[in-house]
Image: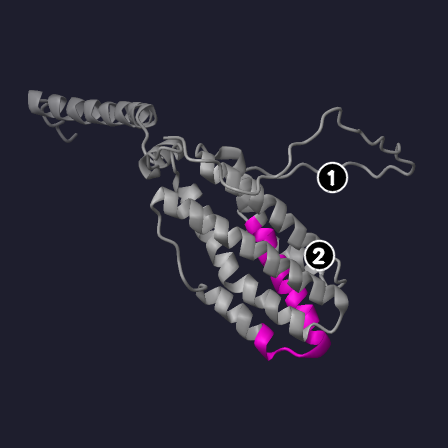
Amino acid sequence: MRPRPPINGRGIFSGTGIIITGLTATLLALVFPIWSYADRSGTGVDVLNATTMSTKYGPLSALDREFLTKVRLAGLWELPAGQQAQQKGTTQAVRTAGQHLVEGHTFLDERVRDVASKLGMELPNEPNDQQKQWLATLDAAQGVEYDRQFANILRLAHGKVFSVVAQVRASTRNSLVRTLADDANTTVLDHIKVLEATGYVDFDALAQDMAAGSTPPLTNSPAPPPFTATPTPAVPVTPSYALPPPASSPPPDRN
């Protein structure tokens, strides 16, 4: 029989050290997430605070500044697109939509430049690459194809801006931005309606484009409700109060 090697203190302590090291690593792995979640950075509130500027009209967030930029950019390409539609549109509905674009964005462009001036913010002076591409597409189109391209390109663009307007109106703490969002909401919704009234908007393609550019939900959507053969008719509700009119001019300075 082969003799067993002698057990010495070094072997015992070596094995014990391995066990202690493993237990310590496990304990640290359990404790570290608690530490990291107790002092997290990069959250929505942190980003909001880090990118917000102080003004005498209230805090101006990064989203507020993005909104001002988008309103300005919209006017830089949708106003000439509206002027073009008044000339190239083959139907009265398309020409009317063009007129609404010209009037609406003339008004909004004056408003956003006034607001940006009071807030000390610079605005772009030419459309972005995507908007230039849209204008090039409209320049090349003729006849009924022009009507179709005009209605669908402009309707898609307004739908994207409309969601930004709603988000800004719901969250801004700046009085000038809030009033501009009211005006933008009224104007953009009017444009959406007149573009749809042309009869050329492809709602299936529009839904696909909007879905492709949206952020997926964090959780799965619930299953659709079961089909009801005879649904209960909806009862319209009439508000018991009058809504305030949309703002048409910036509020006076309060020094």
Q: How is the image coloured?
A: one colour
Q: In terms of depth relative to the viewer, which is nearer, 11 or 215?
A: 215
Across and down, in percent, residue 76 comes to: 49, 62
Q: Nearer the viewer, mark 1 or mark 2?
A: 2
- Looking at the rendered image, the quarter that the N terminus falls into is top left
Task: Look at 73% across and 75% down and name the residue there.
Answer: 144
- Indicate the secondary structure of the residue bearing disc 1: loop
Residue 151 within the segment the image draws in magenta: yes
The kind of residue tagged 2 is Val
Determine the main secondary structure of the stretch shown in magenta.
helix
Drawn side of residue 203 relative to residue 60, left or right = right
The kind of residue tagged 1 is Pro
Task: Check disc 1 and report the residue beneath it.
Answer: 224
Mark 1 and mark 2: span between their CA atoms?
32 Å
Task: Look at 68% across and 31% down and name the residue there.
Answer: 243
Task: Check disc 2 and report the residue beneath it.
Answer: 194
The answer to whether mark 1 and mark 2 are in CB contact below 8 A is no
Magenta part of the protein: which range? 138-161
Across and down, in percent, residue 178 comes to: 50, 37
179 lies above or below 194:
above
Residue 190 within the segment the image draws in magenta: no
Q: Do we see residue 212 in this rendering?
A: no
Across and down, in percent, residue 6 comes to: 9, 24
